[in-house]
Image (cartoon, rainbow, N blue to C red):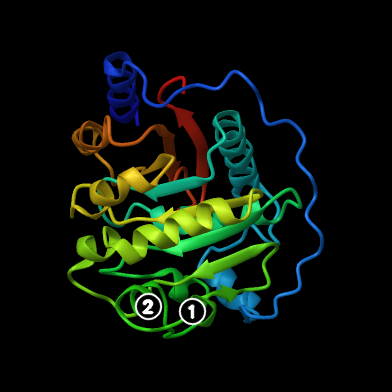
Amino acid sequence: MEELSHAIDQYKQSKNGTGARSDSYAGSRPIPLPIVYTRTRVVECQEDVLRRNRVLTAFERGAFADGYQLLRTQVLHRLRENHWNVLGVTSPRTQEGKTLTALNLAIALAMETTQTVLLIDADLKQPQMHILLGLGPCRGLADYVLGDAPLEDVLIHPKLGRLVVLPGGHPIQRSSEVLTSLRMSALITEIKHRYPARIVVVDLPPVLTCSDTLAFAPALDALLLVAGEGVTTRRDVEEALALVHGATPVLGTVLNQSGKSQGNLKAMRELATI
């Protein structure tokens, strides 16, 4: 992966800084009281399904879980340092593991008692989050934004820590228009500010395959770029970083499918001082 590293180094050298740096660290945060979900639908995911789909951070030990725990620590440090709470996860192209990374990272974050986590499947052309969780077809973000589905009817608590999931719902083609609609903007504003101890993780489409991520970027505090070893090329990384440059701060890249096991992950490599 030397070519990927070179592309990242070039991005660091050309980047003059995005986002204002805060010199104060958030420090200790109040521990939320135990959550009782009364309006959010509670669905217990089957462990065998999660394991088969490599959704392992809730109960697995070893290199796989360790990678996500390290990634969680790195992400939390940057988010709290800058008082951010909305993180987008994307990749240059498809088949690079960004949805699996977003889900495992969200679960790792939700296993801590210092925050709650809302995971949004905003890859509306090809929503996959409900498949990884074994939920089957279900209503979600598209039904909320385009239809009259109340938000509490499309949110799901999968009994994985303090995690709530907003699935994508049925696939739609005019997804960029949905992500930039007034209803979507109002939703992000509400969920961003309603609970101070909530982190929002948004699974977004690949940067180089459609305009959705760039269109949605102003709603994000920061972005995480997922690359797949043996899949992502140096040129793809360069093009993806060039496109998002100036649109939203990029925390770093995550190398997925690292080593012999395609489930392995190497934690975030920072692109710049934020």
Please state which of residues 137 and 57 is positioned toward the viewer in this rendering: 137
* Vertical relation: 146 (above or below) 54: below
Q: Residue at x 33, y 25 (%)?
A: 8
Question: Is label 1 in a helix, a strand or a loop?
Answer: helix
Q: Residue at x 27, y 25 (%)?
A: 7
Q: Are marks 1 and 2 in contact (CB under 8 Å)?
A: yes
**Quarter assignment of residue 241:** top left
Residue denoted by label 2 = 169
Q: CA distance from mark 1 to mark 2?
A: 9 Å
* Vertical relation: 39 (above or below) 274: below
The crowding category of the residue bearing disc 2, from other C-alpha atoms within 10 Å (few below 14, some 14 to 19, many at least 20), is many
Q: Residue at x 42, y 21 (%)?
A: 272
Point out which mark residue 154 bears: 1
Residue 264 appears left or right of 246: right
Coordinates of residue 65 in the picture (x, y in percent): 64, 50
Q: Is residue 105 visible?
A: no
Residue 214 appears left or right of 100: left
Q: Amino acid at mark 1?
A: Val
**Quarter assignment of residue 233:** top left
Q: Residue at x 62, y 81 (%)?
A: 43
